[in-house]
Every structure is written in C-alpha cells, then in structure tokens.
Image (cartoon, rainbow, N blue to C red):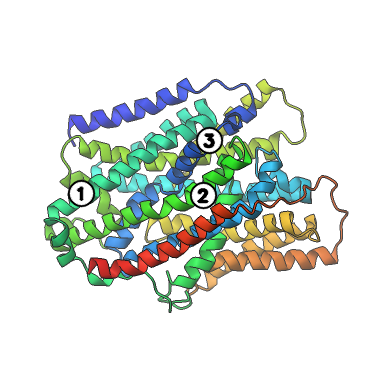
Amino acid sequence: MTWLDYGVIAIYLSGFLLLGYRLQSHASGEQYFLGGRGFGWFPLALSAAATQLSSASFISAPAFVGLKQGGGLIWLTYEFAVPLAMIFLIACFFPTLYQAGVVSIYAYLERRFGPGTRVLLSLVFQFSRAFATSVMIYAVALILTYALGFPLWLTILVIGAVTLIYCYQGGMKAVVYGDMIQMLLLVIGLFVCLIAGLSLLGGWQAFLQQVDQQRLTTIDFGDWGVGSDSGFGFWPMVIGGLFLYVSYYGTDQSQAQRLLSARDPRTVRRTLLANGLLRFPVTLCYCLMGLVLGTFAATHADFGRLIPADNPDLLVPLFIRDHLPAGLTGLMIVAIFSAAMSSVSSAINSLSAASVEDLLARHRHLSDAQYMRYSKLASLFWGVLCIALAFFTGNIAPTIIEAINKIGSVFFGPILATFIAAIMLPRINGFGANCGLLAGVAVNVLLWLAVPGLFWFWWNPIGALVTLAVAGVASLLRSTPQRSERIQPVLDLHMPSITVLGIFFVLIIAVSLALPRLLS
C-alpha cells in the first residue's frame, strides 16, 4: 500500500468521526435510539441493506462462491426466502409492533406476557448479538492482518473504536446515515473488484471459457439438508430461511429498531418492500465477483498459491492488495472497513437501547438528562465489551458468514415463536412463553452439538415449533390471568406490495435456474 491508500483510509475514518460529532444533539431517548421517528423509507432501506450485506458478504460470500469446496452459485439460495419473509412482516408483524410505540421491540412482550418474558428475551438478544458482533470484528480484523500486514490488535481497535465514537455521539441518526454512505462504498467496491477481475482474465468471454462449471449450480431440489454432505438445498433454504429472515428483520432489535424509527406505518411497509427487492441484485453481484476472482485464482498460480486452502476468506483482501492500483486499494480497504462498521454500529446502538429500555428504565422514572446519560454509558459499555470479546474470539466455522448465522440460528426460531405467540396466540401465557423459549434454545444447542449432519438452517423452524409446542402445553398446565394491556393484532394486507414480492420470489428462482445456461 502507498501513502495515497493510507490517505484514503485516514480521510474516511476522520469523516465518520465528524459525522458523529455533527449529529450528537439529542434531547431524549427517542431521538437517540429512534432518530425522533422521522426517517423515510429510502435511508432506512439502505441502512438495513448495509448491515445485512456487510463485511461477511463482501469477504466471505465471494470466497464461498469462488474457492470453498462445495461452494459456488448455490449461495444464491440464501436469498430465496427474503421476499416471502417481507410479505409476512408487512402483513402480520409490524402493523402491530409499530402501533405499540415502543423503543425496544421486547417491550411489547411485557404488555402481553409480563416483565419476565421481556427481560429474558432481551438478555438472549444481548448475549447473542454481542457475541456475533465480536466474531465479526475478530474475523475481519484477522483477514486484514493476514492480507495487508496490519497488526491484529490495531485493526480490531480501529474498527471498534471509530465505530463506537461516532455511534456514541450520533445515536440512531449516525447509524442510519453512516450506513447509507457505507452501502454506497460497498456497492462501488463490488463493481471495482468485478471489473478488475474480468479485465485481468481477458474479458467476459475469456471468463466464460475458464470458469469452473461445477460452481455454476444454483439450485438443488434433491438436498433436504440431512446427512454429512448436506447443505444449501432448495427446501431447507426456503423453509428454514423464511423463519430465519422473519425473525432477524422482525424480532432482532438491531433490525427492528430501524423500522420502529420510521415516520409512519406506510414508511415501514415501503422499507420492507424495498429491502425485499434490493437484496437479491446486490447478492448476485458479489456472487459473480466471487466467481470471477475464484476463476482468476484457479488460472493464475502465483495468486492462487497465496490463498490458504483452510482460509478462503483471504480471496478478496489479497486480490485488493496485489491487483488494484494505488488509491483504489485504499478505497477497497475502506469498503471492507465500511461493511464491518455498519454491522458494529447497529449492534452497539441496538444493544444499548435494549439494555436501557429493558433493564435500567423499567422500574424508575428518568428525566431526559438521566436517560441520555444511561444511554451513552450503555453504548460505551457495549462497544468496549464487543471490542474486548473480539480479542478472545476464535473461528467456529469455515467462513465468517456461516459462523455468524450459526450463532443466530440457535436463537432466531425460538424468539420468532415467542413473538408469534404474543401477537397471534392469545391462549399462551407468560409462563408458557418463557418455558417454550428456553426449551427451543436448548433443543437447538443440542442439535448443534449432537446432530452435525442436520443443516443448521433447519434449526430455525425446529426451534420455533418446539417453542410453540412447549409454550402451549405449559400454558395449559399453569394458567395465569390475561394482561389488560394486550394490544389487539393489526393486519396490513396491502395487496400491491404482497403481489410485487410474490412475483419477485418467482423471478429470482427463474433467474437462478437460468444462470448456469447463461454462464456455460
């Protein structure tokens, strides 16, 4: 790297510190955590996309597509369930949750089930999100260390500290507007790497002649995700993915907080619609980038030998280091930093919102000044904790994104089932909900440890069904009075949005089926 590259990185990091400073005026907790509920659908959709399509996607997904054994364009099946999940969230979930007017998504559960369920589920979120964030920080920092020569401790501190400072100062506004910038940089990075890789291969036609045909498979209808060689089959990815994405976007505070920040229910619907339509095109771009860079590594031995067989995630960073001109290398490093920071900022803000709302402010009346002091202290606590945990986090999966999603899949199904019970199943009480949540998480942990042949996407529906079954039985065994604050469920059957997302679901499957023929 040259002085020009370091200059680009320094300008970027300084810019985000300035962003936090300029947005640091907050008079209340609602302004700090929800931006005063004044966001439109466009910044919210880009912010959600930037967090989900983060460094794990920019680094790990191309490595899976281009290099990992058993990988390829089958990765596209990750996206099949997204439009279906958005339909469910638009119609059944967020009309009720937005109407509740809460800051923490788990506050709704207290009105329905009592304080125990709220605190328990919030603690599950705080534990899982903090750990997953530390995994992501560690993994990205380790990759930058190997590929670019940055010390591991320095990379962890830069990613964590800069994000913590601008998130601490600017709150939700800094998160959302920062994510918009980071999403733009991420997309620029995708296209720069894709075009550079094609150029080095000799163009599109040369790429088609050299690409590994075995990596062009996009859909496997016969793989049900059971057995030692299972994974990424059509049915587990659609069924398991539906549960995963409904839970992630609907019940995870890091994503739901954005939707609670919308100015009105119509904005919530438009944000979910945009997110359902935006993800697949971006995913297709970074899958093609991975295919191009993987082909380059396979056909250019000098570059291919640099990538360890047990660490394919180095594909993109090494390509950036060795095959991009000065200035562009710095810009691409900024794209990696951006992708990581968008995930960390969302985690810090949502963790502090959950801890303040669900643990600190429940039993006491706080003035605005006291609330803001607790909020900023919570942001500082979670930021420092995630950075500290990153120094002790090891690899738990072959690629970053698998590690993060495995952690999430232990909890997503049981948490989703608890919210379904709260909104749609009036006969389930607080005692039953708590028993079901604990049973669902326990079963998923058991599946992880004792049934390695079961593809982890199945943990999501299995955990949800176990949670609902145990919750129903426990509620029958121990009846409790219904809480008077229960909010009646609201449906939003907005047919234009539902129809568009349904057609898009069919379209992305058709495109995925056509890709092998187009690329062979």
Q: Quadrant of the N terminus?
A: top left
Compare marks 3 and 2 and give the one earlier in the sequence: 3
- What's the residue at 33%, 44% (across, down)? 187
Above or below for 157 versus 314: above
Which residue is tagged 2?
273
Q: Nearer the viewer, residue 199 or 354?
A: 199
Measured Cα–Cα span from mark 3 to mark 2? 13 Å
Circle number at residue 25? none
Q: Which of 231 and 91 is in front in this view?
A: 91
Type of the residue with mark 2: Leu
Residue 418 screen position, x and y as percent = 69, 57
Above or below for 41 versus 121: above
**Label 1 crowd bin: few (<14), some (14–19), many (20+), radius 10 Å:** some
Type of the residue with mark 3: Gly
Which residue is tagged 1?
195
Which residue is tagged 3?
40
Residue 370 screen position, x and y as percent = 67, 23
- Image-based side of 342 in relation to 33, left or right: left
